Image (cartoon, coloured by chain):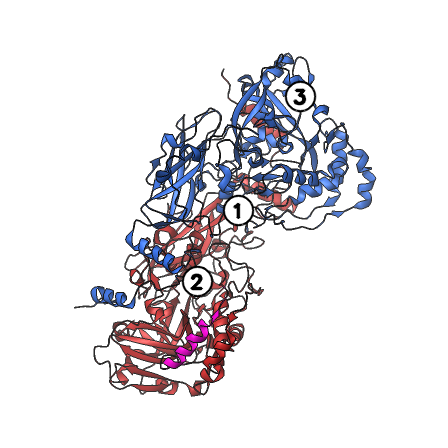
Chain colours: A blue, B red
Amino acid sequence: MGPAKENVSSQTQNRPNEWKIEQGLAGADLPLLDMTGPETKIIPPQVFGKPTKNVEAIKAVGDRNQLFKMERKGWKGFVEWENHPEKKAAAHKILTLQTFPPNPEFQMGEIPPTNPVLPGTHWKMWHHAIGGELDAVPDDSWKTVLEEKHPDMLHLLQFPYNGEPPKRLVTDQVITPNPLHFVRNHGGIPIINRDDFSFLIDGLVANPQSFTLDDLMDESRFPRVKKTITMQCSGTRRIEQILKYPGQGDEVPQAPWAEGAIGTAEYEGVSLKKVIKACGGLVDGAKHLEFYGAETYFKDDHCMNYIASVPWSKVKANEVLLVWNMNGEPLPRIHGFPLRTMVLGYIGARSVKWLYRIKAIREPSRAPVQSQEYLYFPQQVGKHNFRLTDGIQIQEMPVSSAIMSPWTKQVVVHAGKIRCKGWAYSGGGRWPERVELSADGGFNWYTVPLEHMSKKRTWTWRTWEMDLPCDAEGWIEIVVRCWDNALNTQPPDVRTAWNWGLHVTSSCHRISVYSVNTTKPETKARMDEFERRGVPFAPLTVPLAFPAQTWEDYEKFWEKNGPRDAEDD
Amino acid sequence: MGPAKENVSSQTQNRPNEWKIEQGLAGADLPLLDMTGPETKIIPPQVFGKPTKNVEAIKAVGDRNQLFKMERKGWKGFVEWENHPEKKAAAHKILTLQTFPPNPEFQMGEIPPTNPVLPGTHWKMWHHAIGGELDAVPDDSWKTVLEEKHPDMLHLLQFPYNGEPPKRLVTDQVITPNPLHFVRNHGGIPIINRDDFSFLIDGLVANPQSFTLDDLMDESRFPRVKKTITMQCSGTRRIEQILKYPGQGDEVPQAPWAEGAIGTAEYEGVSLKKVIKACGGLVDGAKHLEFYGAETYFKDDHCMNYIASVPWSKVKANEVLLVWNMNGEPLPRIHGFPLRTMVLGYIGARSVKWLYRIKAIREPSRAPVQSQEYLYFPQQVGKHNFRLTDGIQIQEMPVSSAIMSPWTKQVVVHAGKIRCKGWAYSGGGRWPERVELSADGGFNWYTVPLEHMSKKRTWTWRTWEMDLPCDAEGWIEIVVRCWDNALNTQPPDVRTAWNWGLHVTSSCHRISVYSVNTTKPETKARMDEFERRGVPFAPLTVPLAFPAQTWEDYEKFWEKNGPRDAEDD
């Protein structure tokens, strides 16, 4: 694995005095509000009941091992649904002949303190209910997670797998190592042999045809493209919306993403435009390309493949790639091996993994992912009245940013400046021009010096670091905002942009930390006393274990400032 | 039990149409953010470890049954510490010869979903460590809770007992029935026989003397006083501060009070002024009265009685009573039987229960409750730097108010107006003049009509009800504020007045509810469809179980409003 390392910290490592991080107690003993700690221990989520089945009626539908058997050699866990209405009908019958226990509720109460956070109860049960080729998928997928991902990943949803890196590692490097790159899967992970792989381009193209990986890799046919791309899930920072107000619980539970559902990697592949041209181009008014993923997607008791679409204009601009390498290695299975699309500057949901088909069509896809999900609703709309057409189909992400250090509920011991770091990103090929920080909840803003921001690129985030001036003590609110090259900036708070689907949390990221400013003599004296006595300052809430003041001092105060109760003199 | 019933609801029961509450789904199936539900089931809090003792060394201190034996006939659970330095010294030795397991941490993580919420680990262990007369106190106190208080009480702290009525009952009546009145005890409940009771007045008075209850009840000596009084704990609504930022964890854990740490009752007794006069009045520059409660209080491994003081000016104004009846009945044991002080318009902490002594002194009490606790700190002050003298000693409470219905996270189905109810109060004898509600987070304010407010009195709260106009749907924020007769009003938000001691949460009370306005045709149609299909609307987060829109409608929308992606025409 050889991503170009652009670690911001290393850029500044020659200035230890200026940039020495006042670690103090931050992150040491303090419990954190966020879900990232403890990081390594896998605590299983709550186990739920079993489905209630009409066993005889299900048997009457047919032998599930036959109905849903392996279709393509070397494609484990794959069922092609879209060309097989009879399979869809059988699956629908099987699913409606049983009652599944409810998904865990996590928005109204507390986010479970487990890792994985949510089990994906329904999706596991649905796979087992269909059986055949799908039966082993939940277990195979979890095995793949454990093989391919970093042991400290925060597993927001066990199946279909949704995970993000722990806070401390999100912006540790400008290029995210593959094991730490976030994953938002919508189904199980198909295990596909490279040599058995091909995908079809059909629909409204002049000459429908199939391509193998070797076809795509033939540089005499398709020029090779390498691009560094930041991908973001439209659910990034959803936890902030959930903690403010509950919203729609999707069929796939709305994973309570923190700031890590964003990652940057160098991808290698070809421009889809060239491959479409190799099929003779679009015909009959085609304006959109529909991507088919090999995973099975469930919606309203129906089985289908994962399908999303992008407009031809995006493909024409060479902003849609078909890629097989990620950071110099073959795509990990969990990221779509052997081939996926990469749609530059769009939300991750459009970059379909385990691609097996591209279909040229006239209108944006009517498949559920495009027409019923990833919708950005206005504020007056919710369960009581929403229509699908009330939502904007989310393609490009707006400008956003996040503070990755310090974290909410940490104590930061500093000498007038607080070291902060994080990321900033804008979708659609726009880029962060200016990042600003506030230590007072968003009243005064300081600009991050350009020399402490990573390189400006069309399709990537910028990571940044800054020593933020802070005089105030006690709980302070640090806020970040970004201005992109089109001078877009972020809504001030979560309420402003809260939406029923809990997507696109692009409001200014706010964290609360407890500031201890050792340039204040009283504070310096108290902190020295903690040290002298060998008493830890943390946890913050434990009462002071020594007198706050001598009685002599106390009496002197009242001599000078008494009486307690004003008198009529 | 015969409080004058002034139930606001009953005032308006002749106008069923105007005042019909749109109950809809509010409070039915919805989990609540607050701690009041489920109400009746007692779920024990987490059990903690045992102290590590130096058994031999403790034995060497003496026989605890002898050291701390019953002192006064008919006074179970009472130890007089203040006149017995040798007992204090023995107790201190015993306490420091063992290590107690940590108290539960509940501010950094989640508030436990148990009832009792917190166990009071240390206080139970300390009582058992002292043994003798204190050994049975934790159990006796809990038995008293179960005998005297309403089964639906929210037990915030099991021992010393801290509890408040469930939300739905806080303002159900203008006069709080005794079993529902909040309790904030600082120690165990002494079980005192009425006929064995007397208390001493000493210190800087001309003629120190003792009084029995019969002495006080002798109307030829002391004129009888009956007063309706609202008592408020300075911890009321502390949960809002905790949820915003953690703060000091007291020796008695900071009970996470909601809006119910306030109650109103009619008390019967005598003015302390007359009793002081019966002692010949104050001498030698006395300016404060120190009240001694029979419960044992612990601070920094020292045992003491519960002691607080008030200024003579307050007594002189006949604003300090010695009372034996509460709502026409003898004081419940948990509220101080047989005699307590009632300090009008001051925080509850000054109204000492199980009164056994009053001492006239020159300065405000230096006992911990007065000098080290109930302090209102400024914002830059906390564990890192606070001195006791940074805090204002809390006596009068400022103007405040709370919404008792609806509750945060409830769904409210209404026809353009939301029925709200709650309380408003101001300390120091000031009274609520105007209560205002906002349905938009505090931008527009509506005045509660005077005819929907309970009677104006010098020393009590006012309960109120209002149908608040609300057009908006989805999550809305309802806010209440009160203006008292001195035109004081409340800080806008928790941050403004957050303080390290987590006292006096007087900021505008804000609740988030999900508004469903059936005057909107789309909403009406959707709600009718829920009813027609027999599908419950709650829980809110469960996805819509039927199509949000027909496909015909969907396609029509795009015919009219397409394309999805703007084109360059």
| Image side of residue A99 versus residue A317, left or right | right
Who is closer to the viewer here, B165 or A80? A80
* Residue density around tag 3, few if under 14, some if 14–19, many if 20 or more, within 10 Å: some
Res. B493 in view: no
> Residue A213 has which mark?
3
The Cα–Cα distance between marks 3 and 1, rounded to whole angstroms, is 39 Å
Dot 3: chain letter: A
Q: Secondary structure at mark 2?
A: loop
Q: Is residue B381 above or below residue B128?
A: above
Residue beneath label 2, please?
Answer: B254
Magenta highlight on residue B129: no
The segment highlighted magenta reads B77-101
| Label 3 vs 1, first from the N-terminus | 1
Res. B559 in view: yes
Label 1 sits on what residue type? Met
Who is closer to the viewer here, B252 or A23? A23
Who is closer to the viewer here, B418 or A128? A128
Label 2 sits on what residue type? Gln
Labels 3 and 1 in the same subunit: yes
Residue beneath label 1, please?
Answer: A35
Residue drawn at 29 percent across, 85 percent down: B208
Query: At which x and y percent is residue B244?
Result: 43, 52
Q: Nearer the viewer, mark 3 or mark 1?
A: 3
Query: At which x and y percent is residue A233?
Result: 54, 34
Q: Nearer the viewer, mark 3 or mark 2?
A: 3
Dot 1: chain letter: A
